Structure formats: C-alpha cells, structure tokens
Image (spheres, grey):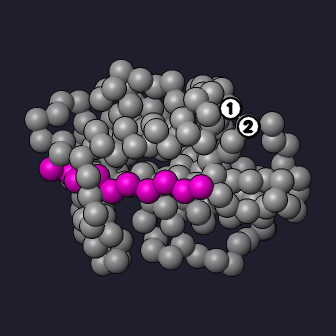
Amino acid sequence: MKHIMLDLETLSTEPNAMITAIGAVVMDFEQGCLREAFEAQVDIESYSGVDGFHMSPSTVKWWLSQDKDAQRHMLSNTMSVDTALFQFMGWAHAITDYKPKELIVWGNGAEFDSPILRNALLRRFDSSDIWDFRNDRCYRTVKAVFPKIEVQTPPLVSHRALDDAKYQALYLLELHKHVGLWLP
C-alpha cells in the first residue's frame, strides 16, 4: 500500500470548489520518511467557461488576508486545471503501478481534500478511480485523538499545498512512531 498526504488550496469550501493548488507526498511508515512529492498550481483563469466549479467570496476575502508569500506562490508557475488534474492522475498511477486499490489518501478533513479532488476528477475526466473511496483517511481525526504529540517543523509557507502536505505527513509519521498507528 502507498499512503499519500494530500492538501488542496481552493477558492471555496464546497465539494465542487475551484482548486488553486494540489500538493501531495508519499509517506513511508516503515522508514519514517517522505518519498515522492507532487505539486501543481492552477491558473484560476482556466476555469473560465468551465461549468460546475464554485468560488466563494468569503474564501477569496480570506485569501486576501493571508501571508503575501502564500499569495505569490498561488499565482506562480500555474497551469490549467485540466493539466494539473491530469498530471496528478499520472503521478498517482505511477506510484501505485496503476493499482488504485493500493493507494491510501490522507487529507486534513474527511469532507475537504479527497472529496473535492475526486469531484474535480469526475467533472473534468469522468474519472474518480485514482483511489478506492474506502481508502480515504482523515488526518485531522487522528491528530485530534493524540493532541499532545507535536512536530516542531512548521510548513515553509503556510497555505502552500505541498508544504502543508509535507507538514501533515511529518506529523502523521511522528504519531506513528510514538503510538504505532495501525496501517495496512
């Protein structure tokens, strides 16, 4: 099994949110380290003429109050939403050797990262079989069960999808080291 930590940046909190960034990293629980990583920034203009994605004024307003480094990063090296999703699918298939049941996807909230990405993949490519829905995992829940374990390394840029995914993954690896999480 391959475990990845997924983090999205979006312009809404709805299941059909416009994705502005995808960050993911493979977690190696046996070695206690991070492996392959994926990152893509989405050009929000690529949603022009694309139906079915949601942008929330309150989320946009929230983004305007965030750190300038996070805002700059969101606008740099962007690609179309279709390219970002297609590249993520290729990355996910490559790390599992095209075996969707071998991928376990962790996100920071049972109703955020995984469902939003699955929804986008379904809308744009009529595909949501990158991983089996039974392999969704909630990092936030596990973290809440063990609130006293902390990781000292903060994200390099808060709300940069890959940095957040790495931080969350390191935290989960640390939890596993201390309490021996049961993992397939």
Q: Is residue 183 magenta?
A: no
Quarter of image, res 71: bottom left
Specify whether residue 155 is in view. Answer: yes
* Residue 1 - label: 2
Q: Position of residue 74 (x, y in %)?
A: 30, 64
Tell whether 85 sits left or right of 179.
left
Say above or below: 15 vs 65. Answer: above
Q: Which residues are drawn in magenta?
A: 36-45
Contact flag, marks 1 and 2 (Cβ < 8 Å): yes
Q: Earlier in the sequence, mark 1 or mark 2?
A: 2
Q: Tally the marks.
A: 2
Q: Residue at x 30, y 78 (%)?
A: 68
Q: Amino acid at mark 2?
A: Met
Q: Position of residue 38 (x, y in %)?
A: 49, 54
Magenta span main SS? strand
Quickly name the residue at label 1.
102
Q: Is residue 43 magenta?
A: yes
Q: Position of residue 43 (x, y in %)?
A: 22, 53
Secondary element at image label 1: helix
Q: Amino acid at mark 1?
A: Glu
User: What whole-number distance in Å separates the C-alpha atoms at marks 1 and 2?
Assistant: 5 Å
Q: Quadrant of the N terminus?
A: top right
Q: Quadrant of the C terminus?
A: top right
